[in-house]
Image (cartoon, helix red, strand yellow):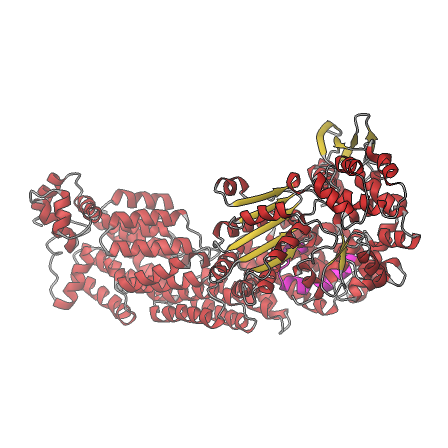
């Protein structure tokens, strides 16, 4: 399957994942360059384009593995569709 | 399986020092000791593993065997997963799971069969067995979870499964919970209470914290043990504990991350670097750490971390292998990536080299992939492939096939062919075809042109075998598409070019040629090919394959009219399984069904029944053909008992599960059903079958439809044919006979001659009829054929009697009935004429009411009536 082939049906989708606690900005690299924003209510919002469901579950699994409590996962809007 | 890395997976981690005895949780574990499944489900750092090791320690000498398996991501491969489970059980109870292991080693065994065998072995154990699966969350493959659910369902009472996981496993938890078969310990249970936190901090950790400090810490960490541990490490030797605690008590920082930072800050720079760099490893060992850090002193560094309780966990008793606490490792890795984004690539690369040098190709490849070094991964994969394929680690191979980019694979024909096998099984025909074409193009080039075009071959020995491998895959690929001619052409090429030591390739090619010859009706060639295939399979110990091919060979012998030879083949198959000694293998049930069919033909009903029963007991060891074959044999037995309706019902059932698994469909169940309809007198149903199959006496005749055309003749002869129709049937029978005799198909010759006898008889040519029958008998008698004649109805039976008496009487007393009443049915009929009710008749005949009703139903069917009164009247008319 060529890169072109993959590109033709994959559309990055913006997700917003909210977790409990403030994650230091250094974790951005760990989450493959997603942006981290610390909110006043003591939560952190992890936001950015995620290629597909498998990648989304990969991010959630990373959160699970460091024991950060998950609050919500929201799909913002899709691009390229 | 005896390598030290595997040992570490099966090692029950030694209980940690500085523990808080968690009696409240032990009590809960103990209370659930009878549960089938104990689930310890909580996030990282909640002390799941520690709790279990400590609890297992409390009943170490109570005669229970403990099997422990620490899982990691690599184990997400069914072949590996189940062999680790068996290895763990063998550590707990030597010899346990040996039969299941043999099945797994034999390959091609469905997981369910392996598990059934394992369950039987567990059943025989006379003490409790506790099987612990730690870190089960790494397993996300549905087939493994299904297998585990099956195991759980069939687990004997004295075997208990314990699962520790960060996520609930996909097992039927609600059902287990409802049945009281599930014990659970979750995060809320595991977290330290204030009291436990105090015990821990001021006890083993040697801190002297005030009640307020402890309450603050407990509240801030919410009893998360990993966080409390990190806090304790940060507090050790600190002057102002209260100030430090207050420093983070009121904020929202991710506490573990913050505390790891604190701990790291307090380490000498060398230790800090060591921790960060080795965090890319999921197992730590002195020289491996040296390789990765490009320094010395790794072993001492690990021992020092162990002493300081700095989140390393020993994986063996020798304290050679360790791992970081998972949570700690993740935080370290995130920090490493942040400090130097390029570092992990370099570090994974070094780890890959170390593993390759130390004979662990699988780990070497994993680290090469993590380093993004696909060239290196491809090279290592090519070398590791033969062993991986032998051990059938298909899921791992498939993962490689998906991760290593196409353009890397394309340059490597040997690697590509190794991956084709797994791609074929996952039904990715386009990729299979692309790889085959690429490899063929490489081979078409002259050797120097190959180098110039950039072809890469690491395993030169495999290159020699490549042309044969390509042809073999081409042959299998053609067979999948049902293209017999192409299958034969490619299989012949395999025989011509495969090296002599490629036993499996050659044996498989012979089997394919056998299958093709059989499909074309060339029985002798087919048998010879299969014989050669089996000889090769025997040399490499592929017993299950031999059983599968024995079914084909016995079918061929039956077609040739050689029942005794067929019987011997099945008996040899059973002997082979017995000699193998690992219990039944796939195909064992089919051997019994095959024997049952032969005994049924000889009208040895008890013998047939016995083998059917033995086959049923081994049902899970049946091939894909077993379901329909077993039903068809039983249907034949019911017919012999006079239960036509039961026979039909079973044949319909057999038709539903009809699957010849690539073998030619030479005796389709539908045709057998049509013949039964004829016997039953339901000529309309038989005609419907003829229409549905689109059969006619003018058809071109082929071996695969021979049985159906004979059936067509039977239907037409019983459908009040006129002279013209009879002539057409006779002409077709002549053609069928010529073909069958030329093809050496004795079974068909017997049937055709018998049907010819009926045709002659219908035309009033009694002498010719008897002559045809005499010839059929000459072939049938030495092999013990009986039922084949009974299947052709009462008129044929009458003709056979005439053969012995010399007098061709018009068919016996039951004239007018296609299917005569059995003796038992005549008994029932006699009582139906009386005043007795159903239950009384049953009692009179000493049979169950159910059996009596079955007989009555059959009588009605045969007489074509719907009530007792009609039956009696019709019987009077017929003079029964």
Residue B629 against residue B318 in the figure, above or below = above
Count of numbered tags:
0
Q: Nearer the viewer, residue B687 or B262?
A: B262
Q: Is residue B352 visible?
A: yes
Q: Which residues are magenta?
A: B377-396
Residue B62 against residue B656 in the figure, above or below = below
Taking B511 as reference, is B855 left or right?
left
Residue B814 against residue B500 in the figure, above or below = above
Residue B345: x and y in percent read: 85, 52
Assess whether residue B390 is covered by the magenta stretch.
yes
| Quadrant, the N terminus of chain B | bottom right
- Helix, strand or loop: magenta stretch: helix
Residue B116: x and y in percent read: 49, 57
Q: Nearer the viewer, residue B578 or B497?
A: B578
The answer to which quarter of the image holds residue A7 is top right
Residue B868: x and y in percent read: 13, 40
Assess whether residue B656 is covered by the magenta stretch.
no
């Amino acid at each position: 399957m060529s890169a072109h082939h993959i590109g033709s049906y994959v559309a990055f989708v913006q997700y917003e994942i909210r977790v409990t606690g403030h994650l230091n900005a250094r974790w951005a690299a760990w989450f493959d360059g997603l942006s981290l924003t610390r909110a006043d209510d003591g939560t952190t919002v992890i936001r950015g384009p995620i290629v597909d469901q498998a990648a989304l579950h990969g991010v959630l699994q990373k959160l699970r593995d460091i024991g950060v409590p998950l609050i919500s996962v929201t799909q913002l809007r899709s691009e390229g569709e | 399986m005896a390598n030290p890395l595997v040992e570490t997976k099966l090692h029950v981690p030694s209980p940690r020092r500085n523990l808080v005895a968690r009696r409240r949780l032990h009590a809960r574990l103990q209370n659930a000791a009878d549960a089938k499944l104990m689930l310890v489900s909580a996030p990282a750092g909640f002390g799941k593993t520690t709790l279990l090791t400590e609890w297992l320690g409390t009943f170490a000498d109570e005669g229970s065997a403990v099997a422990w398996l620490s899982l990691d991501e690599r184990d997400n491969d069914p072949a590996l997963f189940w062999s680790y489970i068996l290895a763990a059980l063998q550590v707990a109870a030597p010899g346990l799971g040996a039969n299941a292991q043999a099945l797994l080693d034999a390959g091609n065994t469905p997981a369910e069969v392996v598990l059934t065998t394992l369950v039987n072995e567990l059943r025989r154990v006379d003490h409790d067995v506790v099987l612990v699966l730690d870190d089960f969350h790494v397993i996300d493959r549905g087939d493994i979870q299904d297998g585990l659910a099956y195991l759980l369902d069939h687990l004997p009472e004295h075997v208990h499964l314990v699962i520790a996981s960060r996520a609930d496993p996909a097992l039927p938890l609600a059902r287990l919970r409802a049945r009281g078969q599930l014990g659970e310990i979750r995060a809320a249970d595991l977290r330290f209470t204030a009291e436990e936190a105090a015990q821990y901090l001021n006890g083993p950790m040697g801190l002297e914290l005030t009640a307020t400090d402890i309450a603050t810490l407990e509240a801030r960490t919410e009893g998360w043990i990993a966080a409390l541990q990190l806090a304790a490490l940060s507090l050790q030797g600190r002057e102002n504990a209260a100030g430090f605690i207050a420093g983070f008590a009121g904020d929202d920082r991710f506490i573990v991350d913050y505390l790891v930072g604190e701990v790291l800050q307090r380490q000498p720079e060398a230790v800090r670097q060591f921790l960060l760099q080795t965090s890319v490893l999921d197992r730590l060992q002195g020289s491996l750490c040296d390789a990765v850090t490009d320094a010395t002193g790794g072993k001492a560094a690990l021992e020092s971390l162990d002493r300081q309780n700095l989140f390393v966990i020993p994986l063996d008793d020798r304290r050679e292998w360790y791992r970081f606490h998972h949570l700690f490792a993740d935080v370290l890795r995130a920090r490493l990536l942040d400090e130097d984004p390029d570092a992990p690539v370099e570090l994974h690369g070094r780890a890959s080299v170390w593993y390759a040098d130390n004979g662990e190709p699988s780990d070497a490849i994993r680290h090469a992939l993590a380093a993004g070094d696909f060239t290196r991964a491809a090279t290592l994969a090519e070398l590791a492939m033969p062993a991986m394929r032998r051990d059938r680690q298909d899921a791992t191979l498939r993962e490689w096939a998906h991760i290593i980019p196409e353009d890397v694979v394309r340059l490597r024909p040997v690697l590509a062919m190794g991956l084709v096998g797994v791609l074929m099984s996952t039904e990715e025909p386009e990729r299979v075809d692309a790889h085959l074409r690429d490899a063929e193009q490489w081979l078409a080039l002259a050797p120097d042109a190959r180098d110039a075009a950039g072809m890469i071959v690491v395993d030169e020995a495999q290159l020699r075998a490549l042309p044969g491998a390509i042809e073999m895959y081409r042959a299998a690929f053609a067979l999948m598409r049902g293209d017999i001619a192409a299958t034969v052409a490619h299989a012949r090429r395999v025989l011509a070019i495969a090296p002599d030591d490629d036993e499996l390739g050659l044996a498989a090619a012979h089997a394919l040629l056998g299958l093709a010859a059989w499909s074309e009706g060339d029985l002798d060639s087919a048998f010879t090919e299969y014989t050669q295939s089996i000889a090769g399979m025997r040399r490499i110990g592929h017993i299950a394959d031999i059983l599968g091919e024995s079914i084909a060979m016995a079918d061929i012998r039956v077609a040739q009219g050689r029942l005794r030879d067929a019987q011997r083949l099945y008996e040899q198959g059973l002997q082979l399984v017995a000699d193998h000694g690992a219990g039944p293998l796939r195909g064992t049930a089919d051997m019994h069904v095959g024997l049952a069919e032969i005994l049924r033909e000889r009208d040895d009903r008890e013998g047939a029944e016995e083998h059917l029963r033995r086959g049923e007991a081994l049902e899970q060891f049946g091939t894909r053909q077993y379901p329909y074959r077993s039903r068809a044999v039983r249907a034949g037995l019911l017919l012999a008992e006079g239960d036509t309706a039961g026979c039909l019902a079973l044949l319909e059932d057999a038709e539903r599960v009809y699957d010849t698994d690539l073998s030619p469909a030479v005796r389709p169940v539908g045709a057998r059903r049509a013949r039964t309809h004829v016997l039953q007198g339901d000529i309309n149903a038989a005609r419907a079958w003829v229409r549905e199959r689109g059969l006619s006496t003018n058809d071109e005749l082929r071996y695969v439809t021979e049985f159906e055309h004979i059936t067509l003749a039977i239907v037409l002869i019983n459908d009040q044919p006129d002279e013209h129709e009879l002539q057409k049937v006779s002409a077709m029978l002549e053609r069928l006979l010529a073909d069958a005799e030329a093809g050496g198909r004795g079974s068909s010759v017997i049937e055709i001659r018998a049907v010819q006898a009926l045709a002659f008889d219908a035309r009033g040519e009694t002498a010719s009829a008897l002559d045809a029958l005499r010839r059929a008998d000459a072939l049938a008698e030495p092999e013990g054929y009986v039922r084949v004649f009974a299947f052709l109805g009462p008129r044929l039976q009458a003709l056979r009697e005439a053969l012995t008496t010399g007098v061709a009487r018009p068919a016996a007393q039951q004239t007018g009935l296609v299917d005569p009443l059995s003796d038992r049915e005549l008994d029932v009929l006699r009582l139906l004429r009386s005043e007795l009710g159903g239950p009384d008749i049953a009692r009179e005949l000493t049979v169950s009411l159910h059996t009596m009703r079955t007989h009555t139903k059959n009588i009605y069917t045969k007489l074509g009536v719907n009530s007792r009164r009609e039956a009696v009247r019709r019987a009077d008319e017929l003079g029964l």
